[in-house]
Image (cartoon, rainbow, N blue to C red):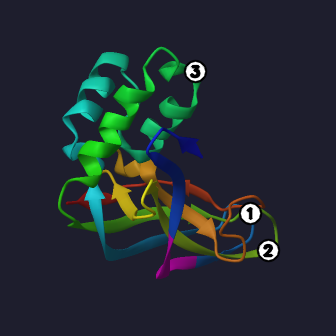
Amino acid sequence: MATTNSYKVTLSKGVEEGIGASVSGKGAKARVQGSATVKARHLDSSTKYKALQSKYDFRKGTSGFWSWLVGSGSEHVSKEEKEEVFTQVVNTQEINATFRYDLTVEGYAPNVQVDARAYYFYFMITDDQGNTYHIVSDGDPGGDTGAVNADDPSGKGDQPGVSNNNTTITV
């Protein structure tokens, strides 16, 4: 979690119900395809986000920005500049973001079935008034989507391998 003077920002994982595949055994592969649409605000609409991404060359997308934001790469950027990104985004209109999942999942252990579900990363932002905002990006679909073990959506335990992630995000 990152906190600025006015915003609490959390990187979250949206696990999709009904978009997944089952694989059984180490090396077994299955293709995951499907689409889902969510209402959200668009990170890439922030001119400040674009300027910071260009200047500091961090990976695009929600997870790329998060890694930079909480890592050492952003230590020389003021809280005010970071906050400006979120102020710009929360003041935009909600949009429909469509995730078209197309990826391959792979089993991780012999004789073990894994039920994998597609997921996407998003920011949950809460302002100082308690309002919450769901924020997505279309800047790095392969980095902001994947598959998780349906029995362990937190991602802390054994997870399926993911390859050939050709997922697209349309806003």
Compute the Cα span from label 3 to label 2. Answer: 39 Å
Query: Could you tell me how far apart the alpha carbons at marks 2 and 1 are, in whole angstroms?
Result: 8 Å
Name the one closer to the observer, 149 or 47.
Answer: 47
Residue located beneath label 2 in the image:
112
Label 3: element kind: helix
Mark with earlier residue (2, 1): 1
x, y percent for residue 86 = 34, 44
Q: Nearer the viewer, residue 8 or 44?
A: 8
Q: Are marks 2 and 1 in contact (CB under 8 Å)?
A: yes
Q: Secondary structure at mark 1?
A: loop
Segment colored magenta: 15-21
Q: Position of residue 33 (x, y in %)?
A: 39, 73
Reading the image, the residue beneath label 1 is 26
Mark earlier in primary sequence (3, 2): 3
| Side (left or right) of 40 relative to 6 | left
Q: Residue at x 51, y 77 (%)?
A: 20
As shown in the figure, which amino acid type bears the numbered disc 1? Lys
Report if residue 165 lies within the magenta region: no
Q: Is residue 138 visible?
A: no
* Residue bearing the label numbered 3: 72
Q: Please identify the dominant SS of the magenta region.
A: strand
* Magenta stretch holds residue 17: yes
User: Dot 3: few (<14), some (14–19), or many (≥20) neighbours within 10 Å?
Assistant: few
Q: Is residue 104 left or right of residue 166?
A: right
Instruction: Report the mark closest to the observer, 3 or 2.
Output: 3
Numbered disc in front, either 1 or 3: 3
Q: Characterize the local packing of mark 1: few (<14), some (14-19) or many (20 or more) Cα atoms within 10 angstroms.
A: some
